[in-house]
Amino acid sequence: MEMINTKNAPAAIGPYSQAIVTNGFVYTSGQIALTPNGELIQRDIKLQTKQVLSNLKNVLEEANSSLNNVVKVTIYLENMDDFGIVNVIYAQYFADHKPARSTVAVKTLPKNVLVEMDVIATVSLFQ
């Protein structure tokens, strides 16, 4: 088991790793709308979704993976009314690749962000 840590995504805000690689898969922790230097993105669903997906991309790359290797995404939304906006931005990052996905409405998220996501992806054998 390998713990993943990259400076290209925000540091964990608790006792956990950005991701773990084991048995050919990378499991990311939930990413929220923090910049790599830990600054919170303003409460705008478009901006926050882009930051979350950028963070996930960077964590995956550190783990020798990519968004193209993602097999499962879980999205946590503060407001299900944002589902359509998140879908449009999500589609820009995943293009023709369509991993399995769950979307869950939650009461609150860490730091009162609007969206959080985590993924499971395969690890690339060759970069």
Image (spheres, rainbow, N blue to C red):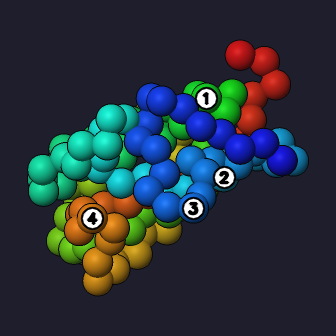
Query: What's the amino acid at mark 3?
Result: Pro
Q: Are marks 2 and 4 in contact (CB under 8 Å)?
A: no
Q: Earlier in the sequence, mark 1 or mark 3?
A: 3
Q: Is residue 20 left or right of residue 104?
A: right
Can you tell which of label 2 and label 4 is closer to the viewer? 4
53 or 18: nearer the eye? Answer: 18
Which numbered disc flags the more N-terminal residue, 2 or 3?
Answer: 3
- Please, what is the three-letter code of the amino acid marked with disc 1? Glu
Three-letter amino acid code at the position of disc 4:
Lys
Q: Earlier in the sequence, mark 1 or mark 2?
A: 2
SS for callout 2? strand
Find out whether the residues at labels 1 and 3 contact each other: C-beta distance under 8 Å: no
Instruction: Report whether 97 appears left or right of 1.
Output: left
Question: Which residue is identified by label 4?
Answer: 111
Query: Which disc number belongs to residue 24?
Result: none
Q: Amino acid at mark 2?
A: Tyr
Identify the disc placed on residue 62: 1
| Disc number for residue 27 | 2
Q: Quadrant of residue 6?
A: top right
Local packing at callout 1 (Cα closer than 10 Å; few below 14, some 14-19, many 20+) is some
Q: Residue at x 33, y 35 (%)?
A: 37
**Residue 121 against residue 107 in the figure, above or below:** above
Can residue 71 be seen in this snapshot? no
